[in-house]
Structure formats: C-alpha cells, structure tokens
Image (cartoon, helix red, strand yellow):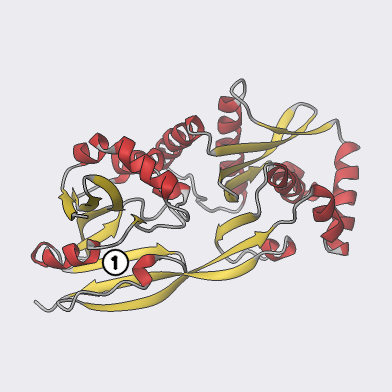
Amino acid sequence: MATVVERIAAIHRLREIQTEWDTLWYRTPNASPFQHSAWLLPWWDTFGSGEVFSFAVRSDGELVGLGLFFLHTWNDRRQVTFLGNGVSDHLDILGNEAGILEEIGNHKDAWDTCDLQDLPPESPLLRAQIPDSLLSEVCPQHTCSAAPLPDTVEAFRAGLPHGLKRNLRRYASQLKAAGSVSFETADESNYQSFIDALFALHQSRWAIKNGKGMLEGSSMERFHRRAAENLWKQGLVRLHGLRLSGTLIAVVYAFVHRQRAYCYLGGFDPAFSKFSPGALIMAYVIEQAIREGVSVLDFLRGEESYKADWGARKSLTSRLLMWHEA
C-alpha cells in the first residue's frame, strides 16, 4: 500500500475533510470526544491563533491517521500544539501515527518547540520513534481518574461504601422534605433549558468561592454552547439534572462514547449545598451510564477527593516535548 503524509496548513482544508475525519474518529478505538470535529472546529473558531499545522496520513487514498496541531507564538517561540489545548482533558492523534512525527521533524524550520499535552497512557505518540533530528522529553502531567462500573445498577448500589450509601439516603430524605425531588436526562424538548441551567448553576457556585470556574468569559461560554450543540447532534452528549419542585438545582454535562462516559462539567445551586446535590446527581449519572452499557466512568483530570468515593482509580496524562538545535 502507498502511504502518504499530507501537511494541512489551513482550517478550510480541515473542514473539507470533516466527513473523513469523523469516520476516522469512529474507527479509532480510544478516541475521545475531545478529538471530534464537533469539538475542535468550534475550538479553533473561538480560540485558534497562528496557523493550522496538521498532518493527514493516507493509505491508498484512505484517511488512516490525523495529527491535529497548530503553530503559534508562545513565550516568543514558535510552538506546535494540539488543537483543543486548554479545554480538552485528553488529546492525541487519531488512527495511525505512521509518519506524523517524522513530518513534524521535516518541517522543523517552521517551529522551535513542539509541546503535545494531555496524552493518555495508551497514546501511540508515547511509543513512537522520535526522529533523529529532534530532541525530546516525556513528562508526567495531569492526574486523571476513572471508575470501573459493574454490569447492573443493583450491583452498583450494593457495592457502594457504607458511609456513602448512608449519606445518599440521608441527603435524599432531607431534600424530599423541602419539596418534590426528581431526576431527569435531557432530550430534544428541554436540551436548551438544561444548557442554560448548567451555565447559571456552574457560575453561581464558583461566584460563592470567588473563583472563575471553567465557563468564565463570553468566549468560553460561546465555545461550550456551540461544541455542546454539535456533540449533542452526534448523540454524544448527556445532560443530567436534579429538580426540586420542578426547578433544576444541579446539572451534569457528560459525554458517552462506546462503553465510556466522561463527566466533563457540573453545577449546582449553592443554596442547597447542605443536601449535597453533587453527590445525589452523581449517583444518578452513574446509574444512567450503567443502563446504557457503560463500563468506565471517566472523571477526567483533577484530584478532587470525591472521585475516590465512587471507586475512581488514578492515572497520569503525559506531555511530549520536542525541540531541535538551532
């Protein structure tokens, strides 16, 4: 088979191959939603700078690999970085790596450093041959965690730690005394109201902490609204809510692909924090994931202690740095 690596230097070219890109995404076993065009094209439209510096691997004309990078100035140096950097918890190439690092090396006159972040442990880039013309270092980066899930909701409930099980019963009982309680997963009829509630709840919670949260700023909100809508149309988004007397007081924004669910973002009304709505909604999120046949709940990056309560196990992402002598 004839294998060719094509350099893609303009965003319009990525848009032209979007159908092939998405087909490759679905064929790549460990692909995450953060590599889908529905996520990365809005990212570029919102945050992109410099120029696209991506590479497509074709075998007899078929797209079999895709490295989605851009070239920009960072700290007065020309740097190659993944599209999606900063808001994506897992980034990687799609499909076959063959030739992508070599082509980056072949174009080293265009860049000074190559900083590929948020690589999962199974990334082919961590096992790839670094071109002889480049120097490199792999560094541990972010702590992530994921919990294996049992096959049934009954097994999940039975396996909860005694203290957590007791607290969930107590919180639910106390909340029911304050009004009618219901859990719900968004559908086409109420998707927009769930998204609006997610933004409002997330921001109000972080305002109490005098922090920025993940949705600070109009650009961030614009990106997330567009990316969420795009991924929703692909059937990859789940919006789970907890209602008290009909009002959403907690929302979790998650993705589901194959047998993995990703808990990306949540928010709850701080006025009800004494009822631990975060724990109550998380139990519902996990049960819904199990009903969908999900076997792993990915809590993504961050070392929050609550994740261990649900059986999450820690892992590390990596950062591949490459540079060359001037």
| Residue sitting nearer the eye, 137 or 104 | 104
Residue 243 in the image, given as x and y percentages of width and height:
75, 33
| Residue sitting nearer the eye, 297 or 210 | 297
Q: Residue at x 64, y 68 (%)?
A: 313
Name the kind of residue labelled 1 in the image.
Answer: Asp
Residue 15: name its quadrant.
top left
| Residue sitting nearer the eye, 213 or 104 | 104
Residue 60, compared with residue 102, is above or below; it is above
Residue 131 in the image, given as x and y percentages of width and height:
20, 74
Indicate the secondary structure of the residue bearing disc 1.
Answer: strand
Q: Residue at x 31, y 39 (%)?
A: 20
* Furthest-top residue in this view: 189
- Residue 90 in sight: yes
Q: Residue at x 28, y 47 (%)?
A: 63
Quadrant location, the C terminus:
bottom left
Which residue corresponds to mark 1?
Answer: 115
- Residue 76 in sight: no
Residue 165: name its quadrant.
bottom right
Residue 237 in the image, given as x and y percentages of width and height:
55, 38
- Using residue 108 as the reference point, say whether residue 319 is left or right of it: right
Residue 109: name its quadrant.
bottom left
Count residues near mark 1 (Cα–Cα under 10 Å), then give few for <14, some for 14-19, many for 20+. some
Quadrant location, the N terminus:
bottom left
Residue 128, compared with residue 281, is above or below; it is below
- Using residue 131 as the reference point, say whether residue 152 is left or right of it: right
